[in-house]
């Protein structure tokens, strides 16, 4: 089964939006939503696709069990942080997710 392939520990962070009390500026804090097992792989080249008339680049792909996430979340694995650019449920079978990501640090 593909779940046997999910050996890396992945952390998923959700954003919380607010207003700074000292400066009055909008602020975002990141809260650990969950940890789960998955596998992150680099894509073969900088693949690109169009979404809402913007070109979005992906550098890595995450394979994992079904976890609630969307493009506002961040993924952390080891010392790398990724921005989610797309979440796909292959074949609509609700068995696992394919998450396209871009490394940000």
Image (tube, helix red, strand yellow):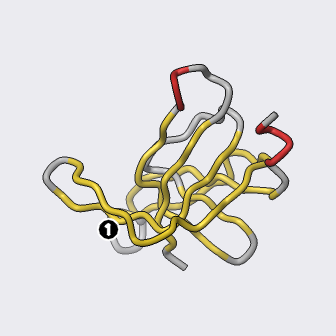
The structure residue drawn at horizontal position 52% and vertical position 65%, both measured from the top left corner, is 43
Which residue occupies 41% across, 65% down? Answer: 20
* Residue at (53% x, 31% y) in the render: 89
Is 47 placed left or right of 33 in the picture? left
Locate residue 16, reporting x and y percent. 50, 51
Picture coordinates of residue 19, whole percent (x, y): 38, 59
Of all residues shown, which one is farthest toward the top? 93
What is the count of numbered marks?
A: 1
Spot the residue most to the left.
Answer: 53
Quadrant assignment, res 27: bottom left
| Horizontal side, residue 54 vs residue 79: left or right | left
Q: Which residue is mark 1?
A: 25
Quadrant of the rendered image containing residue 58: bottom left
For the C terminus, the quadrant is bottom right
Q: Residue at x 50, y 68 (%)?
A: 44
Viewport quadrant of the N terminus: top right
Q: Picture coordinates of residue 3 (x, y %)? A: 80, 38
Q: Is residue 105 above or below residue 96?
A: below
Left or right, 86 with respect to 35, comes to: left
Q: Nearer the viewer, residue 92 or 34?
A: 92
Taking 64 as reference, is 47 above or below it?
below
Q: Quick one: SS at disc 1?
A: loop
Task: State whether residue 58 is above or below residue 103.
Answer: above
* Mark 1 burial class by Cα count in 10 Å: few <14, some 14-19, many 20+: few
Horizontal and vertical percent position of residue 42: 58, 68
């Amino acid at each position: 089964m593909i779940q046997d392939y999910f050996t890396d520990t992945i952390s998923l962070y959700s954003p919380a939006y607010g207003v700074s009390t000292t400066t009055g500026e909008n602020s975002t804090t990141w809260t650990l939503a969950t940890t789960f097992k998955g596998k992150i792989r680099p894509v073969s080249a900088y693949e690109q696709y169009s979404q809402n008339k913007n070109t979005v680049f992906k550098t890595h792909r995450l394979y994992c069990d079904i976890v609630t996430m969307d493009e506002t979340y961040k993924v952390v694995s080891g010392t790398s942080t990724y921005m989610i650019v797309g979440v796909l449920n292959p074949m609509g079978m609700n068995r696992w997710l394919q998450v396209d990501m871009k490394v940000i640090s």
